[in-house]
């Protein structure tokens, strides 16, 4: 057993005698209540991404359309793993790489952009939260390869 030079027991306040508050149980309860917020956040970001994609699908890719897609994709990339959707975050990261490509907006491969959006939507709809979800992981790898191929030829 290692002896720590810091007495962590002094850092934790003592509970009053007879206190019915269990700090660990309280923290777990707080996390559980936040889970609903996580799902609502993910649903909102997915909605923003879908709406942007619908506009781009109708009007074609423009600088404004690119930015409208990039913003929710970037948010999903940054927060999805924390909120229980690691595959959605990885796929959104690939979408960000694609949207960041040094090409004119109208030269971006719309089918590949759409495939990313559809994959993220499917993950959210199916609540595929396992980072090793078999179908989700296969899809993520295939999309990443397609992005790499596009960037190699256009990056």
Image (cartoon, grey):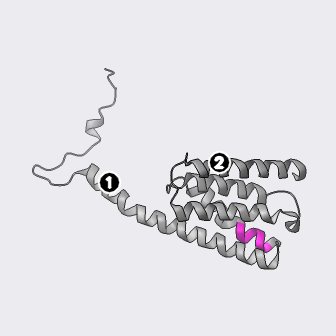
Circle 1 sits in a helix, a strand or a loop, which is it? helix
Q: Which residues are magenta?
A: 64-69
Callout 2 crowding tier (Cα within 10 Å): few <14, some 14–19, many ≥20: few
Q: Residue at x 66, y 57 (%)?
A: 92
Residue 72 screen position, x and y as percent: 64, 66
In-image side of 128 versus 103 (left or right): left
The residue labelled by disc 2 is 138
* Label 1 neighbour load within 10 Å: few <14, some 14-19, many 20+: few
Q: Position of residue 62 (x, y in %)?
A: 83, 73
- Judged from this view, the residue extending furthest toward the front is 135
Q: Residue at x 15, y 54 (%)?
A: 20
Q: Residue furthest left?
A: 18
Residue 59, by quadrant, is: bottom right
Which residue in the protein does label 1 denote?
27
Residue 46 position, x and y percent, is 59, 68
For the point 77% across and 74% down, the residue is: 56
Of callouts 2 and 1, the N-terminal one:
1
């Amino acid at each position: 057993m290692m002896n720590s030079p810091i007495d962590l027991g002094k850092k934790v306040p003592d509970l009053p005698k007879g206190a019915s508050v269990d700090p660990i149980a309280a923290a777990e309860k707080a996390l559980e209540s936040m889970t609903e917020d996580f799902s609502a956040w993910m649903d909102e970001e997915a909605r923003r991404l879908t709406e942007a994609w619908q506009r781009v699908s109708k009007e074609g890719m423009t600088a404004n359309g690119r930015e409208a897609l990039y913003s929710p994709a970037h948010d999903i990339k940054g927060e999805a793993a924390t909120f229980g959707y690691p595959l959605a975050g990885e796929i959104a990261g690939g979408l960000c790489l694609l949207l960041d490509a040094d090409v004119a907006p109208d030269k971006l491969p719309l089918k590949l952009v759409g495939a990313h959006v559809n994959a993220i939507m499917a993950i959210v709809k199916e609540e595929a939260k396992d980072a090793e979800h078999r179908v989700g992981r296969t899809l993520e790898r295939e999309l990443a390869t397609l992005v790499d191929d596009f960037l190699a030829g256009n990056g």
